[in-house]
């Protein structure tokens, strides 16, 4: 590091003068700290280097202070260096990470290497050098922008901070000290314009014409796809079959317009469906919509998969693509402007106020504004920003992008839909699809299609949630009477602040008498809402509810919840009294909602009101929302044995919230009307569509069986029987036993003694997950195995130098892809059977005479397949799949084995778990190393590497790319030594480096 800095001293340049940049590096064993500094003063560069013992409390800081002098000090991410700063530095330090956060708050990541790549022209050499270059480019971008505006950015920031009696932003003085940037423009990141690859497109079209435009034939051409350095392109027949089926369906070459395709992991599913989608868009002007369930896959498609396929085909810049979400996922520029103008705070902090300015930077020019794309780095550093976002997100009922005069991302995205070739969306938006005018549902590809069958009921449900309704009522509560409302007694006392709906009251000339009537009705609604929760808290239900109370309002009201002891006698408690209480309260709420709507309707004088004003439109949108709430209450209160709805109540176990849901049961009819009847072609893809060798469950649930369709099951690419060992534990406690989580924790530890971590443990219950996490935290303490919860911990599994366990719930059953030795064991707490008393499915069984097995098995089998599918994702994957509570139904287990690609479920005791696991991993690792060495040898053959040390380095890089945890050395001139867990290999140079075939 020091040599690098000294060598580059003459080349280093800083836009800022009289500034010292500091960086801290900890040694591998964390007992020493290396402190490196570079100071810029009067066009000279000075270097500081010093190593400090981490426990040296008597370190003399004089040399460091002498070096810094009276210059400014800047470091990257002060929070991560807090201990050092508190111990050794008394001066005010500028945070480079905060500078980038505030000026460029729309980046996806804020680590130094990422910022170096995106902001500078220079290859990453060291953190310190990158920090200097990052600051240079940020300052230049500020100054260039200032030339185009009347107010400098620092002036805007400081003015807003001063409004709240806060001092100027720490960076502003230094930024203002820079005058002329002409001489600095050579430091700025240069964007390279990519030329359109017309030659490659012409080549692809010629090859297509030679193959009668059968897109799948392109997959056999290595020259098109072999571009990823370090890997040889491998043709996969399964991918070919996938593309062929999609091409035939989209191009109307067959009688069917819907294809249901089970595509196993590892075949290159994304490329398999993107190839025909892109070529149909380019050659036949077909407009495609790709729907997926997870945010991670949406981002992967937009940022990686689609660009890669376009580049391979020479079509980058010739196909328009993007993604869109529901309105409430975007920041509303108009709401943000109003929020910023009216914002008040009793004890404002600089981070709190900068958070508002940061949102303003995000939405500038309408290029950014997706709330979910705001980096976790920003959300963590500016923790109040979450509260700001709640007030500035787009209102679905109010937003009218066609009539909006603001530049915002959502408005721009809606407009772009008209000309867009490929649009990526999520399943929830697909079910509603509000953009039919801009882009009709013509050709759809649904990835992770199995989720539609599971979540489809939620997409079409109507919901009343206590907290959301309470917030809505607060927003429409008349300003003059807020002091008489229950809101005034909340923890954070409501200030008498004029809200947007108060402006609507004024606009439609509502007097105090009318507003008083409205406030009285709202008070009565609030009293009844609160009484629903109070009833449970003050009754016998409070003694029984370890979990949320959840039941079908009419059909399950007589079911027994449990027993309570009264006067030395146990009495059964049903849902009946709670249902009666809710029925009574909802009836009163409904009457008051109707009264409010009647008051508003009777007192609006349509003739004297400006109906084109934004205030009027806002008010009418809110009234429409109130009408929808009334309709949901009415539908919830209606009931006949023959109707096709489930009415479900769920009450939080702590009685702080409740939800009333009306679920339509004819999902197939709704899906057919809203989607299937509108499309020209529809492709449904998943690794888990079939159950018991057919797709009847999936197709019947979504109404696909009502239209012409085809089923296609592509054979698995990998041999599951050889690569995955499936085990069921015979002697653990039953899942409802209090010792179950303790047994799980002890068993996971036993497994980890063999696997050294690299284990994902999946849970059907978050309660069991939390208890197991607590137990394992104590068991693994001091054992060199880290433990994480849920998806945030997944990336740690990929670290071959870290031993860790990740516990995950429903979100980790899919979307987890950890290759090679990163994940060698997946466990499942229990067979995920449906609760026979589940309100939705028990209603379906009662109303339509269906058996429990016919509903349970398909869903259970799909979830188990998804869990097991976390192991085998690529060529070098292997491992054990272990179910802790296997159940007692032998017939079901036999069926399940057939659905798990024929993998036998071996029933073993917990004392034998280590032997089974160890034996299987040893066998698999021998095979993995054989396959890796063949592939690496083939790659070496086409290189000019000959020196044994260079071969060693090459092999190490290839092993790391494949996540193979091995040690490679070359102790002499002609042999390579590889240690892979318990296996050792000595390979002569002539065997690892074969001659190229002529």
Image (spheres, grey):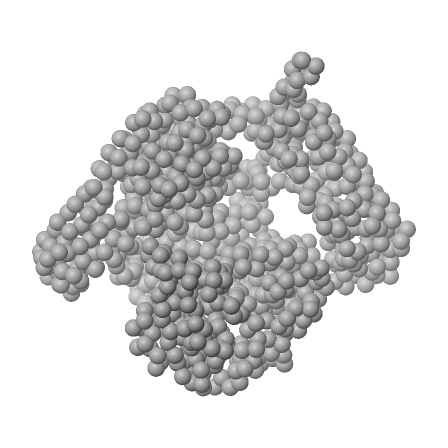
Asked if residue 118 shows in the view, the reply is no
| Residue closest to the eye, 265 or 154 | 154
Outermost front residue: 58
Could you say where residue 306 lies in the image, as x and y percent from the top left? Answer: 41, 59
Tell me the residue at 40%/36% (across/down). Answer: 779
Which of 482/502 is in front?
482
Q: Residue furthest right?
A: 513
State the image coordinates of residue 382 (x, y, percent, origin top left). Answer: 57, 59
Residue 75 horizontal side relative to residue 896, left or right = right
Q: Nearer the viewer, residue 930 or 79?
A: 79
| Residue drawn at (43%, 80%) of the image | 40
Residue 919 image-quadrant placement: top left
**Looking at the figure, which quarter contains the C terminus?**
bottom left
Q: Is residue 851 visible?
A: yes
Compared to residue 790, the image places residue 227 above or below, namely below
As displayed, is residue 666 above or below residue 377?
above
Q: Quadrant of the N terminus?
A: bottom left
Q: Where does the image place residue 170, in percent across and percent down from the top left? A: 57, 72
| 652 left or right of 585 in image | left
Residue 660 quadrant: top right
């Amino acid at each position: 590091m020091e040599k690098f800095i000294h060598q580059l001293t003459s080349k280093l340049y800083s836009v800022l003068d009289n500034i010292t940049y500091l960086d801290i590096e900890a040694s591998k064993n964390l007992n020493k700290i290396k402190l490196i500094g570079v100071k810029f003063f009067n066009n000279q560069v000075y270097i500081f280097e010093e190593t400090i013992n981490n426990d040296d409390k008597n370190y003399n800081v004089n040399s460091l202070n002498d070096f810094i002098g009276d210059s400014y000090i800047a470091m990257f991410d002060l929070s991560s260096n807090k201990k050092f700063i508190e111990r050794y530095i008394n001066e005010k330090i500028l945070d480079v990470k905060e500078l980038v956060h505030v000026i460029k708050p729309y980046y996806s990541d804020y680590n130094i290497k990422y910022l170096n790549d995106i902001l500078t022209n220079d290859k990453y050499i060291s953190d310190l050098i990158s920090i200097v270059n990052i600051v240079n480019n940020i300052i230049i971008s500020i100054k260039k922008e200032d030339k185009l505006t009347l107010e400098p950015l620092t002036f805007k920031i400081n003015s807003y901070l001063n409004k709240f009696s806060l001092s100027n932003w720490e960076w502003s003085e230094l930024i203002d000290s820079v005058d002329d940037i002409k001489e600095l423009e050579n430091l700025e990141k240069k964007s390279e314009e990519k030329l359109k690859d017309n030659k490659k497109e012409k080549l692809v079209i010629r090859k297509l014409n030679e193959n009668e435009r059968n897109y799948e034939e392109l997959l056999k051409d290595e020259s098109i796809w072999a571009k990823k350095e370090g890997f040889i392109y491998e043709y996969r027949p399964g991918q070919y079959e996938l593309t062929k089926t999609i091409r035939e369906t989209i191009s109307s070459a067959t009688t069917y317009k819907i294809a249901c395709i089970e595509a196993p992991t590892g075949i290159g599913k994304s490329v398999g469906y993107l190839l025909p989608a892109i070529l149909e868009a380019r050659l036949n002007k077909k407009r495609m919509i790709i729907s997926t369930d997870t945010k991670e896959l949406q981002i992967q498609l937009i940022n990686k998969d689609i660009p890669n396929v376009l580049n391979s085909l020479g079509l980058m810049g010739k196909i328009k693509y993007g993604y869109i979400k529901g309105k409430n996922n975007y920041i509303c520029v108009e709401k943000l402007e109003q929020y910023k103008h009216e914002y008040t705070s009793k004890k404002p902090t600089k981070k709190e106020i900068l958070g508002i300015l940061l949102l303003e930077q995000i939405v500038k020019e309408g290029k950014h504004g997706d709330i979910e794309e705001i980096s976790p780095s920003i959300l963590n550093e500016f923790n109040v920003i979450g509260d700001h976002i709640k007030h500035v997100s787009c209102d679905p009922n109010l937003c009218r992008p066609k009539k909006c005069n603001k530049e915002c991302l959502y408005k721009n995205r809606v407009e772009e839909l008209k000309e867009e070739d490929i649009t990526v969306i999520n399943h929830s938006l697909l079910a509603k699809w509000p953009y039919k005018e801009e882009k009709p549902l013509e050709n759809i590809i649904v990835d992770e299609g199995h989720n539609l069958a599971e979540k489809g009921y939620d997409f079409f449900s109507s919901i009343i949630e206590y907290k959301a309704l309470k917030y809505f009522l607060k927003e429409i509560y008349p300003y003059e009477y807020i002091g008489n409302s229950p809101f005034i007694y909340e923890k954070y006392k409501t200030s008498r602040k004029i809200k947007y709906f108060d402006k609507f009251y004024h606009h439609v000339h509502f007097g105090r008498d009318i507003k008083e009537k409205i406030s009285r009705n709202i008070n009565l609604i609030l009293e009844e809402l609160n009484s629903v929760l109070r009833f449970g808290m003050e009754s016998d239900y409070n003694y029984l509810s370890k979990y949320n109370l959840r039941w079908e309002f009419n059909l399950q009201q007589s079911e027994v919840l449990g027993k309570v002891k009264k006067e030395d006698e146990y009495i059964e408690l049903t849902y009946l009294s709670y249902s009666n209480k809710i029925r009574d309260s909802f009836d009163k709420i409904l009457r008051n909602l109707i009264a409010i709507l009647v008051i508003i309707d009777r007192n609006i004088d349509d003739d004297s009101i400006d109906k084109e004003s934004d205030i009027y439109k806002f008010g009418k949108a809110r009234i429409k929302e109130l009408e929808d709430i009334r309709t949901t209450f009415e539908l919830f209160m209606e009931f006949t044995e023959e109707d096709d709805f489930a009415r479900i109540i769920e009450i939080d176990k702590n009685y702080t919230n409740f939800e009333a849901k009306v679920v339509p049961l004819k999902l197939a009819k709704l899906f057919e009307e809203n989607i299937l009847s509108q499309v020209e072609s529809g492709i449904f893809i998943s690794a888990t569509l079939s159950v018991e060798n057919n797709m009847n469950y999936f197709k019947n649930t979504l109404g696909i069986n009502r239209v012409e369709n085809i089923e296609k099951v592509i054979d698995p690419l990998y041999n599951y029987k050889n690569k995955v060992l499936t085990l069921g534990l015979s002697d653990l406690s039953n899942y409802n036993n209090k010792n179950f989580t303790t047994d799980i924790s002890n068993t996971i530890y036993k497994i980890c003694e063999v696997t050294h971590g690299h284990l994902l443990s999946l849970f059907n219950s978050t309660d069991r997950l939390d208890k197991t996490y607590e137990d394992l935290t104590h068991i693994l303490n001091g054992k060199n195995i880290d433990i994480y919860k849920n998806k945030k911990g997944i990336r740690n599994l990929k670290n071959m130098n870290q031993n860790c366990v990740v516990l995950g719930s429903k979100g980790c059953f899919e979307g987890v892809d950890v290759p090679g030795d990163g994940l060698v064991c997946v466990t499942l707490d229990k067979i995920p059977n449906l609760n026979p008393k589940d309100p939705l499915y028990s209603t379906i069984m009662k109303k339509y005479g269906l058996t429990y097995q016919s509903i349970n098995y398909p869903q259970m089998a799909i979830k188990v397949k998804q869990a097991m599918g976390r192991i085998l994702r690529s060529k070098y994957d292997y491992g054990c799949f272990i179910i802790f509570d296997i159940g007692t139904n032998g017939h079901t287990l036999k069926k399940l084995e057939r659905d798990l690609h024929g993998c036998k479920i071996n029933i073993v005791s917990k004392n034998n778990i280590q032997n089974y696991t160890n034996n299987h991993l040893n066998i698999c690792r021998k095979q993995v190393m054989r396959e890796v060495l063949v592939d690496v040898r083939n790659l070496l053959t086409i290189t000019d590497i000959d020196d044994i040390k260079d071969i060693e380095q090459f092999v190490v890089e290839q092993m790391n790319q494949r996540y193979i945890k091995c040690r490679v050395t070359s102790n002499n001139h002609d042999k390579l030594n590889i240690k892979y867990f318990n296996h050792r290999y000595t390979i002569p140079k002539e065997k690892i480096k074969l001659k190229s075939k002529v």
